[in-house]
Amino acid sequence: MKTLQKQAGFTLIELVVVIVILGILAATAAPKFIDLTSDAKASVIEGVQGALNSAVDLAHAKALVEGKTAVAGSTQAISVGSESILLNYGWPTTADISKLVDVDSAISNSGGNFFYVDSTSAADCDVTYTNSVTNTETRPSITIGDLTKC
């Protein structure tokens, strides 16, 4: 006579049900443990820095073409669209840089300092434009803060 062997283990259906339940739990719980908002805010600030670099270079190129690079201070200007941009040695002044960059309402601008409104530390999660140049060859400073604190 044949002896029946008793098998032990899980059926395929039981394994599939457990995997589906684990997948549902992982999909609902993972966003609570992985917070990507600080990375997104840091990327926004880096985008603003790129926009500032482009805007400054384009304004300076226009100033060079129009021959408005020789005077220091806010005595010369170029027109960009309907805006008049004051220049310092052909570079946009700190006060007028916000006229060249159109940022979302989530970004605040205070005298050349662009920062994410909802960041935990606006003093660090920012990009700052400073035009303290003394000649046409020196580029204004565009510095980015500590993005780990966004």
Image: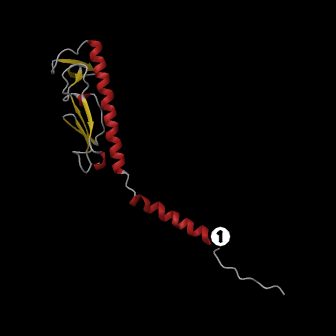
Res 96 quadrant in image: top left
Q: Is residue 58 left or right of residue 18?
A: left
Q: Residue at x 77, y 84 (%)?
A: 4
Res 86 quadrant in image: top left
User: Which three-letter amino acid code belongs to the residue tagged 1?
Assistant: Leu
Q: Circle 1: is it few (<14), some (14-19), or many (20+) Cα within 10 Å?
A: few
Relative to 36, say whether 7 is above or below: below
Res 59 quadrant in image: top left
The one nearer the camera, 64 or 116, is 64
Q: Which residue is mark 1?
A: 12
**Rendered-image quadrant of the N terminus:** bottom right
Location of residue 3 in the rendering, given as x and y in whole percent from the top left corner: 79, 85
Location of residue 55 in the rendering, given as x and y in whole percent from the top left corner: 31, 27
Relative to 33, say whether 117 is above or below: above
Q: Is residue 80 left or right of residue 10?
A: left
Q: Residue at x 34, y 33 (%)?
A: 50
Location of residue 9 in the rendering, given as x and y in whole percent from the top left corner: 64, 76
Q: Secondary structure at mark 1?
A: helix
